[in-house]
Amino acid sequence: MRTLTLLSLLIFITMQGISQNNSAFYAHREAHFLYYPNTSCESTDLKKVGQFLETALHCELEANITRGTEASTVYHFRQLKNQAPVYHGFANVIFNHNTSQFLVIYDVFQDVPEQLLDKGFSWYFNNEWIPVSIQTKYNEETQNVEEQIFDTQHHLINATDIALYAFPKDSTVRVKVFNTDPLTTAHKTYTAPYIDYNDSDVAVLNAERIWKQVTATFNLDTFWLRNRYLVPFKYNLNTSYDPVYRKDTSFDYTRHQHEFEDVMVFYHITTFHKYLTSIGFDTIGYLPTPYDAHGQKDDNSMFLPGWGLIYGTGGIDDAEDAEVIVHEYSHSLREYASPNTANGLERQAIEEGMMDYMATTYKFSIDSFGWKKFAFWDGNNPSVGWVGRNMASPKIYPQALTGNIYDNSELWSSALLRIYFKLGKTITDRLTLQTFYYLTNNLTMPQTAYLFIRADSALYGGVHTETIWRTFAETHILPWYTGVNTSKPIFTSSPLILNAMKFATGQGSLEILLSSHPQGTYQVFNNLNQCILSGNFEGGNITLAPGILGASGIYYLSIVAKDGYQSTSKIVVE
């Protein structure tokens, strides 16, 4: 719901935990874009694409997974060195079926030593590459599922909490639910008597329950809350309950009864996924998805890949609010479409913003009262700092960015809602879901806006490009243009940046290659938007000497080529 973590059996995780000295390097790395005409690659065969990428990016790659929709095919590759995986090194290739270009999104390391290990991973630690092994374990002390990294002496050197925080014959049953929450349908704010009262049966709250129908499983003489979308499971033996079932077809419970939250999760996710089917995304997601409506006592919920949906019972029970329910389920959809790709500070804010958007538009389809606040019912627990999120934020990029991904997420979710009001629910929802397949680690908001426009090109031939561009420009996520010429490609390749790791630690020069843009100017800005360095470049090459930027921090390299090309890239100095 509010905490974003990620369970991953692979290698793409932002560094936190025991090792902090190199965490900024991983957290602040940025993905890069390269565009090529389809004729650049001999074919779209996976092997041929891999060979092309290895030559273009000067590194060893291994095909990982393939995802696709009716509009696009996405190949995921991970970086290797001497056949051993390089932690956080990746390259994804997006082929839109109706365009003449393909897009490469990548973040690879150019300076991994030749000899580390016959197996295991190469990991950057204390300003050098070391061989490590990686395990995923449950930590009983912290009660977190962690990715744990060990050196060759089996010493634990890093631990990261990695959860994403938010059959037989079918038969129709009747369920009594909030649609979507008691405040929304009552058109009330969180004031007495419309407050939680410690989960008790308040008459005005129970009165907001209504009858709905949903498809469940009938086995022998019993109806179970499971179907092709969902299956119950017990995540925490201390808080979880046995699966809900009945001998009759009426699942009628009050909010004080624990069965009520199971019914809420089951009804709203089933209804939501049926809507996804209606707009062409039936196969997205891990079907069926396990769910536990009482998986933890905290006032927080999460999606754990490999486990399922886990809703918290602290404060107001999270599963009493359909927005929270759909938010967490949307994490599972994105994780299916682009596994293990929610790393990087801006990327995590985008993740939360997208899920808030999906939840809010689901609510909008039922009742728009209170839409400007995500989690209109559940987000009323100020004692733990949880008061919902602003879905109509006036924040401006990048000035409004902070170190808090949840504050930053309001910028992205609000931008999507502005597009929603211009293009409508179906179009904007489909574009968001298509973009799920394009996401990678370390994306910025401008880069993700480009991918959103690419989704429009794939699904609608780019007819909404100008509207989308102008809307993102309203909050400076994309630059202003007096006009967007949709007859020409608006996408340009990112510069190829080499030796970023040694430059970050003062051990080597930073090389920026712009082979298609030989001449121009560049400027480097600090976080106060002050220009601290500028110059001209020739031959498509910029070199920054180690230490030239001075103090540690995050800087932005702005490039303007004489042919009109512009780009902005993030630079980290430790």
Image (spheres, rainbow, N blue to C red):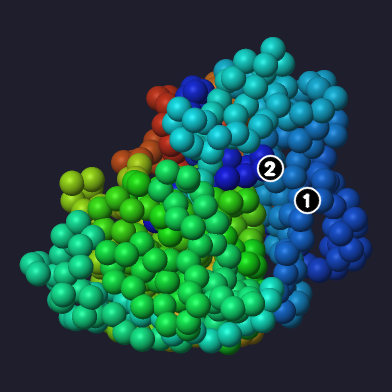
Is 542 above or below relative to 381?
Answer: above
> Which one is nearer the viewer's eye here, 71 or 530?
71
Helix, strand or loop under label 1: strand
Q: Is residue 474 visible?
A: no
> Which one is nearer the viewer's eye here, 377 or 68?
377
Give residue 75's mark: none
Q: Type of residue at label 1?
A: Asn
x and y, in percent, of residue 45 in the image: 89, 63
* Circle 2 Cα neighbour tier, 10 Å, few/some/many (<14 / 14–19 / ≥20): some
As drawn, is 273 to the left or to the right of 524?
right
Helix, strand or loop under label 2: loop
Q: Is residue 228 visible?
A: yes
Kindly identify the residue that appears in the image at 40 percent across and 86 percent down.
212
Residue wearing tag 2? 10
Kindly identify the residue that appears in the image at 62 percent across and 44 percent down.
8
* Circle 1 Cα neighbour tier, 10 Å, few/some/many (<14 / 14–19 / ≥20): some
Q: Type of residue at label 2?
A: Leu
Kindly identify the residue that appears in the image at 60 percent across and 29 percent down.
148
Is 7 above or below relative to 311?
Answer: above
Residue wearing tag 1? 64
x and y, in percent, of residue 472 in the image: 42, 69
Which of labels 1 and 2 is toward the front? 2
Is 16 above or below relative to 530?
Answer: above
x and y, in percent, of residue 180 in the image: 33, 76
Residues at marks 1 and 2 touching, judged by CB atoms closer than 8 Å = yes
